[in-house]
């Protein structure tokens, strides 16, 4: 009988860390960092509100980094929560 800690010869495959870890950009999830930067750039460049654009980028990125430190998969979980909110009411 094979124990839980033993390995069967020929049935092992190395797994790279990139397959298991989320993709972060500056500590925030990549998609959220791109959207945050795009909106801040539109505010700063398009509306010529430089200070507001920089403040929005800094605040949004800081919040995303803190949330990603707590749970790197918070973005898909938040999207699923917002989508299924009506189904889970008591």
Image (tube, helix red, strand yellow):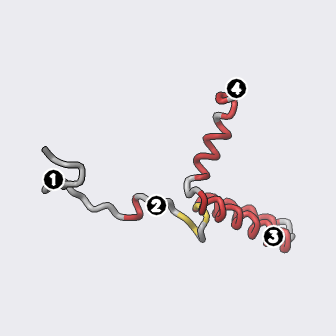
Q: Quadrant of residue 46?
A: bottom right
Q: Which residue is mark 3?
A: 55
- How much space separates mark 4 and mark 3, taking CA atoms? 39 Å
- Separation of residues labelled 1 and 3 (CA atoms): 55 Å
Q: Position of residue 81 (x, y in %)?
A: 64, 40
Q: Toward the viewer: 38 or 65?
A: 65
Above/below status of 83 relative to 38: above
In this rendering, the label closer to the viewer, 1 or 2:
1
SS class of the residue under badge 1? Answer: loop
Are the two marked residues, 1 and 3, in contact with CB atoms closer than 8 angstroms?
A: no
How many marks are shown on the rendered structure? 4
Please give the name of the residue rendered at 85% of the width and 66% of the height, measured from the top-left corner.
47
**Which residue, given by chain and number where applicable, does mark 1 sit on?**
8
Query: Which quarter of the image is occupied by the C terminus?
Result: top right
Q: Gap in Å between the C-alphas at discs 4 and 2?
A: 35 Å
The residue lying at 32 percent from left, 61 percent from top is 15
Identify the residue position indicated by label 2 in the image. Answer: 21
* Circle 4 SS class: loop
What residue is disc 4 on? 90
């Amino acid at each position: 009988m094979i124990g839980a800690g033993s390995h069967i010869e020929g049935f092992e495959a190395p797994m790279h860390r990139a397959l298991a870890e989320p993709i972060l950009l500056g500590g925030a999830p990549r998609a959220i960092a791109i959207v945050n930067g795009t909106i801040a750039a539109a505010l700063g460049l398009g509306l010529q509100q430089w200070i507001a654009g920089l403040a929005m980028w800094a605040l949004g990125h800081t919040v995303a980094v803190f949330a990603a430190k707590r749970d790197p998969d918070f973005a898909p979980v938040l999207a699923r929560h917002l989508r299924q909110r009506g189904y889970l009411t008591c």
